[in-house]
Image (cartoon, rainbow, N blue to C red):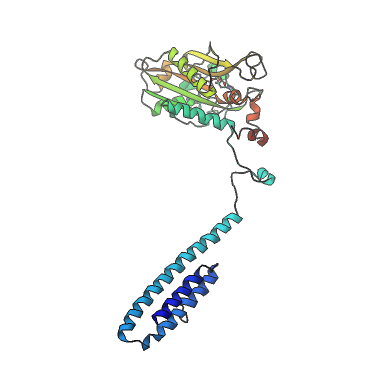
Amino acid sequence: MLQKLEEVKKEFDSLLGSVKSMPEMAQFKADFLGKKGKLNALMGGMRELSVEDKKSFGARANLVKQDMLSAIDRQSQSLEMEVINAKLAANWQDISLTDKVKEKGQQAAGLHPLTKVTRELEDIFLSMGFDILDGPHIEDEYHNFEALNIPDSHPARDMQDTFWFKDKKHLLRTHTSNIQIRGMKQKKPPFKFVGPGKVFRCETLDASHEAAFHQLEGMMVGKDISVPHMIHFLRTLLSEIFKKEINVRLRPGFFPFVEPGFELDYECLLCGGKGCSVCKQVGWVEGLGCGMVHPKVLAGGGIDPNEWNGFAFGLGIDRLTMMRYHIDDVRHLHSGNLQFSEQFKAY
Ligand code: FA5
């Protein structure tokens, strides 16, 4: 009897691997372990055994049964996985692809050049110990203007053509400087943070002007910070992003929230300074606005201007991206044209 039991086990082991589906497995299980299965048929013969043999046969038969049940479980699980994997392979969809791309056949996606430059900027600032903050696109008058020392009726409000909401109290932020105000409320000095994001202006469009573009705001507040600190810092930043030293020039610039204020231009890398449509034939590109934070702005943010000072800047990310990737019109960046975006996959 024991020998027969071992033979049934051997047969079970040799046939299990050939079971290829769940219905086949149900039949296989019934053949060996069902009421009318091979194991039960053997158990029926136990009546004829001596008490001693019954004991040892019974113990072995139980072990064999447990072994068979576990082997069936394992094999069933892998059959179920095969079914799931086959379904996944047959119905595979990349939900990040647009319908148009799908029609052309599936393609690997890539990051937009603006995303790449923004992420690179964030990495540079993180490595210098800056925090990264965010601010809302829909802003109120206070954060976009008033707290930045631009009161109602101040001519500086007209410097940036604003998209207002009907309530006349809310607007699409015209710059990322609103992040300065929100950041000061969150942080205790000394602090340094940047805030990248989209900004909106009712602009006449050309090769270097978009109506929705991107800026990166930066603010550093501490003790005894000076203009040379700011210049050194901005130069370092630009040489990191362009991976080489580039010529920059600083001009006085008027922004009510800084004093003194400057505009920093960098040499146009599209024409090498000779003049083109992006730099309006002057060889320089307006890269960013910057300056020492106005004491009124610090005080409004709950920071004592007699104890603390610092600098702030607002950098145009779109123009930086154009220089970096030699793109000769800002409107390409926002065109949504895949043929354009695909060129940057490899960079
Ligand atoms: C500002 O927006 C100030 N908030 C910057 C600032 C921050 C000054 C902190 C001082 C302290 P401005 O309007 O110059 O400044 O814009 C900053 C940069 O955004 C420009 O130098 C330019 O690179 C970019 N920029 C401005 N307008 C456009 C536009 N229409 N399209 C693309 N880039 C633009």
Judge whether residue 166 can be spotted in this image: no
Camera-side residue of 194 and 103: 103
Residue 133 lies, in percent from the top left, at 45, 30
Query: To which quarter of the image does residue 222 belong?
Result: top left
Q: Residue 241 in the image: x percent, y percent?
A: 52, 24
Residue 295 visible at all: yes
Q: Residue furthest bottom?
A: 48
Place of residue 215 in the rendered image (x, y in percent of width and height, measured from the top left): 54, 25
Where's the N terminus, which quadrant? bottom left
Name the residue rendered at 44%, 74% in the picture: 9
Q: Going by the picture, which residue comes out furthest to the left?
A: 52
**Residue at horizontal 55 percent and vertical 17 percent from the top:** 246
Residue 62, quarter of the rendered image: bottom left
Quadrant where the C terminus sits is: top right
Quarter of the rendered structure image containing ligand 1:
top right
Of 149 and 2, nearer the camera is: 2
Q: Residue furthest top?
A: 252
Question: Residue extending furthest right?
Answer: 104
State which quadrant residue 53 falls in: bottom left
Q: Choose between 160 and 199: the one closer to the eye.
A: 199
**Residue beneath the point at 67% across and 43% down:** 100
Q: Would residue 165 appear left or right of 306 to someone viewing this image? A: right
Q: Which of 206 and 37 lies nearest the eye of the viewer? A: 37
Q: Position of residue 4 (x, y in %)?
A: 43, 80
**Position of 56 relative to 117 (above/below):** below
